[in-house]
Amino acid sequence: AGIGKHFKYLILGGGVAAGYAAREFARLGVKLGELAIISKEAVAPYERPTLSKAYLFPQGAARLPGFHVCVGSGGERLLPEWYSEKGIELILRTEIAKAELTSRALTSVAGATFTYDNLIIATGSVVTRLTDIGVQGADCNNIFYLREIDDAYKLVSAIQARKNAKSVILGGGYIGLELGAALQINDLDVTMVYPEPWCMPRLFSPEIAAFYEGYYAIKGIKIIKGTTAVGFDSDANGNVTKVKLKDGRVLDADIVVVGVGARPHTTLLKGQVAEEKGGVKTDSFFKTSVPSVYAVGDVATFPLKLYKELRRVEHVDHSRKSAEQAVKAIKASEAGQTVEEYDYLPYFYSRAYDLSWQFYGDNVGDTVLFGDNNPLSAKPKFGSYWIKDGKVVGAFLESGSPEENKAIAKIARLQPPAPDLEQLKNEGLSFASKF
Ligand code: FAD
């Protein structure tokens, strides 16, 4: 191997977790040249959730440098200059092809080597492509995925190139729902297709999902459930023209957006580090099984103290907090000190149209819906509780105020005994507000 650059701290991946880790290093003190971030992306860390929201607005769209971290959590915006001022090296457009943890060396696709004393793995997730799963015709043009800013840029260009295009969205999760709204706002004809009986089945109860599906239908979005895409037709230029569904239907399409899932990006580490639940196994300080190697964000499977269980969380709030925890732990251990165990309360959110929901806690057990979930209402506002072993363990709220969102976060953490379900339904949000 060639002579590479050496860093005391090296972050592999330049996404959300990397950006928040850099800020924490700067807070706790790093010397010039001690820290580097290696990213295959061409830009400094940014708030990834913006890509499926304001980045796609037809007017007043968010663009870099507007949404670099840490604006998404109300923090300082770290521009590329910030990193140079702090002596933090941003090694961009550099994809690591090989990681050798025993020799503490990373090698890029172009053959550059980087060595380290401490490594933080923050490689995030890789989207599942239909070509990976062998869907016929999936390599034709105008089939889009959304993970990185390059993907968002390509999608925006396609939207702008074809006014009134027909679009088909495959997948009814976060990406599908946010993209459905974004394309409809851009005046595209939108059809969403997903195999499950209702959208966001990993989180939503049928009652919650019914509201969003109804709301989308009012906006003119067509929803086809219970089937998947099995093939695509394209024209002589290789541009997609039709989506063929398993149930035999064929949809016209100029633009297809696929949001069918993602998996943690751990391929570089296979066989070198303990894994669990598809991610890199860590302790409460995000230390992996290999000394001086940490894993944070989407790739980490960590002890979720509240539920006494190892979990992986693919959400932005955890990516920020896990990054900060790892850096605190690294710095403390150098000083012969320790930090408190990570004690995370799961928090997810999404926004589309004028809608905005938050969820805290665990979505297990029975559910109770409260409030007005009629999509035709002028100001719908509703929520749901999850009840397990007689305790309220999770709470969801659409269109909550900041105080109300705090209240549901609080009960998800406290897990108070649940009254009977009828009473809980009647009390609704006032149940949470009591605590
Ligand atoms: P990422 O932010 O994905 O960063 C990983 C980085 O590693 C990338 O820069 C990547 O290029 C780089 N990388 C990977 N492999 C290599 C390699 N071999 N060499 C060099 N660099 C590499 N969460 C929410 O809670 N709410 C939301 O509304 C929400 N919206 C989202 C919208 C979109 C479009 C997406 C894609 C995700 C959204 N998420 C949302 C999830 C959230 O963004 C992620 O959980 C978060 O970004 C994870 O942070 P991370 O640092 O672990 O990974």
Image (spheres, grey):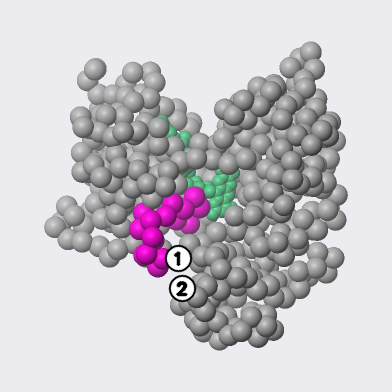
* In front of the other: 420 or 262: 420
141 drawn magenta: no
Residue 3, quarter of the rendered image: top left
Residue 326 image point, x, y percent = 31, 52
Disc 1, SS = loop
Please, what is the three-letter code of the amino acid marked with disc 2? Arg
Q: Where does the magenta region start and end?
A: 302-318
Q: Residue 129 sits in which quadrant?
A: top right
Q: Residues within 10 Å of mark 1 (few under 14, many from 20)?
A: some
Q: Marks 2 and 1: CB-CB under 8 Å?
A: yes
**Residue occupying image coordinates x 46% and y 53%:** 313
Q: Is residue 142 above or below residue 282?
A: above
Q: Image height check: is 66 above or below 395?
A: above
Which residue is identified by label 2? 413
Label 2's element? helix
Q: How many marks?
A: 2
x, y percent for residue 215: 79, 58
* Residue named by callout 1: 345
- Crowding near the residue tagged with mark 2, few <14, some 14–19, many ≥20 C-alpha atoms within 10 Å: some
Q: Confirm whether the magenta stretch covers residue 309.
A: yes
In the image, 55 versus 66, the foreground residue is: 55
Residue at x 63%, y 50% (from the top left corner): 174
Tell me, yes or no, if residue 410 can be seen here: no
Tell me: 161 left or right of 318.
right
385 to 433, vertically: above or below:
above
Does any atom of ligand 1 lie closer than 8 Å to the CB of label 2?
Answer: no
